[in-house]
């Protein structure tokens, strides 16, 4: 793995900038230090910042820590004409320490030419290290770090919120078939993370059955309204369960 010491320029995830992801996943060098020396430096130094980008089925996602105490998530939905949706969360110090430790531990994982996922880290000494990979080449260590970052940054919640907002816009334009699709994508992305088996009373599953029946009947306006309420409810349950300590910072 080779390293450059030039200043890091943050990527802005957008459809127009999709090609930048390919460059984001390739390494270049301006520093003659060996990969072994860099790996040792990263293992021993504090991680000053970290950034994860993902090409998801329905969105490009960017998660980064730079401002102390803040983690930012930017979601750019496919074929989106509006500005990307951004969420800024208060980051607990213990979470940031855990992320730094995990990223530093990846220093010997290296990079591949695949760029479905990319992870950048910069050390306090100015060193830069990055990894890029795809699902087929994802190691267990990379998967664990990626999922840790996604969880601590509420990445799925952020993407689901973006789908909710798009669906509402589509309802306002009376594009009910598109709205149905958007709400379904949000529900799928959020998955079961909103559930607390010990306390959550969830009747949204029955509402999904009703929404599907209305969709099959061609009553897309009704189906979209039901799906919107389901997604709203599940996002609210997720927030109640997970976001009490991670206050949104808009």
Image (cartoon, helix red, strand yellow):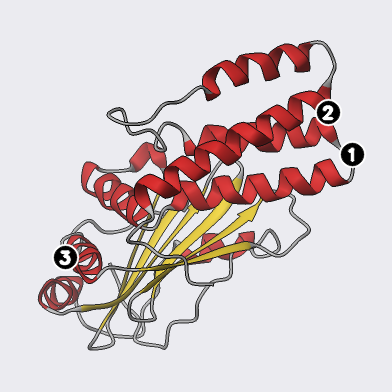
Tell me whether circle 2 and circle 1 mark residues in contact (CB < 8 Å).
Answer: yes
The residue that disc 3 covers is 101
Q: Nearer the viewer, residue 79 or 163?
A: 163
Q: Earlier in the sequence, mark 2 or mark 1?
A: 1
Disc 1 from disc 3: Cα separation: 48 Å
Residue 209 left/right relative to 70: right
| Secondary structure beneath label 2 | helix
Q: Earlier in the sequence, mark 1 or mark 3?
A: 3
Q: Is residue 226 above or below residue 56?
A: above
Q: Quadrant of residue 74?
A: bottom right
Q: Nearer the viewer, residue 110 or 197?
A: 197
Tell me whether circle 3 and circle 2 mark residues in contact (CB < 8 Å).
Answer: no
Say few, some or many: other residues with alpha carbon within 10 Å of mark 3 (under 14 / 14 to 19 / 20 or more): some
What label sits on residue 174 in the rendered view?
A: 1
Disc 3 from disc 2: Cα separation: 49 Å
| Secondary structure beneath label 3 | helix
The residue that disc 2 covers is 221
| Image location of residue 21, percent across then percent down | 54, 61
Q: Earlier in the sequence, mark 3 or mark 2?
A: 3
The residue at the point 25 percent across, 46 percent down is 144
Disc 2 from disc 1: Cα separation: 8 Å
């Amino acid at each position: 793995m080779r390293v450059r010491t030039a200043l890091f320029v943050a990527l802005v995830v957008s459809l127009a900038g999709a090609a930048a992801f390919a460059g984001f996943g390739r390494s270049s060098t301006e520093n003659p230090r060996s990969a072994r020396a860099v790996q040792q430096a990263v293992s021993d130094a504090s991680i000053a910042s970290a950034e994860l980008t993902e090409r998801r089925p329905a969105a490009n996602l960017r998660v980064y820590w730079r401002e102390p105490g803040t983690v930012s998530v930017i979601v750019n939905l496919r074929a989106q004409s509006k500005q990307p949706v951004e969420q800024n969360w208060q980051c607990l110090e213990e979470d940031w320490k855990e992320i730094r430790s995990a990223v530093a531990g990846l220093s010997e994982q290296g990079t591949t030419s695949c760029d479905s996922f990319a992870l950048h880290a910069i050390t306090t000494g100015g060193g830069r290290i990055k990894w890029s990979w795809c699902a087929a080449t994802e190691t267990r260590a990379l998967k664990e770090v990626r999922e840790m970052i996604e969880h601590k940054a509420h990445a799925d919640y952020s993407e689901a919120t973006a789908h909710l907002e798009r669906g509402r816009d589509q309802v306002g334009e009376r594009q009910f078939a598109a709205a149905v699709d958007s709400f379904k994508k949000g529900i799928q992305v959020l998955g079961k993370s909103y559930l607390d088996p010990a306390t959550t009373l969830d009747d949204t599953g029955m509402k999904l059955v009703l929404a599907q029946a209305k969709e099959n009947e061609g009553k897309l306006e009704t189906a979209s309204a039901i799906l919107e309420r389901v997604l709203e409810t599940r996002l609210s349950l997720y927030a109640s369960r997970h976001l009490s300590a991670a206050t949104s910072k808009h």
